[in-house]
Image (tube, rainbow, N blue to C red):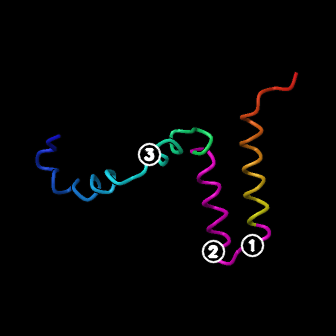
Amino acid sequence: MNYGKYTDYLKPMLADLAVTPQWVAEDLARPELNLLQNDLLDQLILFSTGRTRLDRTLSEIEKLGSQVLEQKRPPHN
């Protein structure tokens, strides 16, 4: 594909994209992961900056994951 005047600008991004594994696109295509991503990053930032302890961070991440899994489960009959 010819990107015209943007070819040089896009070259590094296209090179990265060419070696990106397929599972990345599959993960990003899942809406539940997109909704969860910011919350997970918030928890990791809180831990990495020393504002929360590891056990609290892991507990919060587990809660977030459980909420997503609950949304995906079919209703019980």
Where on the picture, by quarter, is residue 32? top right
Q: CA distance from mark 2 to mark 1?
A: 9 Å
- Along the line of sight, the residue nearer the viewer: 63 or 14: 14
Q: Residue at x 51, y 44 (%)?
A: 28
Within 10 Å of the Cα at label 1, are there few (<14), some (14-19), or many (20+) other Cα atoms? some
Q: Nearer the viewer, mark 1 or mark 3?
A: 3
Asked if the residue at tag 1 contacts the one at tag 2, i.e. Cβ–Cβ closer than 8 Å, the answer is: no
Q: Secondary structure at mark 2?
A: helix
- Badge 2 amino acid: Ser
Relative side of 6 to 76, left or right: left
Give the labeled residue for mark 2: 48
Residue 70: x %, y % from top left: 77, 38
Name the residue nearer the viewer: 50 or 14: 14
Q: Position of residue 58 (x, y in %)?
A: 75, 64
Give the residues in magenta.
34-56
Compared with 62, 44 (above or below) is below
Relative side of 21 to 54, left or right? left
Closer to the N terminus: mark 3 or mark 2?
A: 3
Main secondary structure found in the magenta portion? helix
Numbered tag placed on residue 54 in the rendering: 1
Q: Earlier in the sequence, mark 2 or mark 1?
A: 2
Q: Secondary structure at mark 1?
A: helix
Task: Give the class, few, some or many, for how many residues have Cα within 10 Å of label 3's Cα (few <14, many ≥20).
Answer: few
Q: Based on the picture, tell me whether residue 41 belongs to the magenta stretch.
A: yes
Q: CA distance from mark 1 to mark 3?
A: 31 Å
Check disc 3 and report the residue beneath it: 22
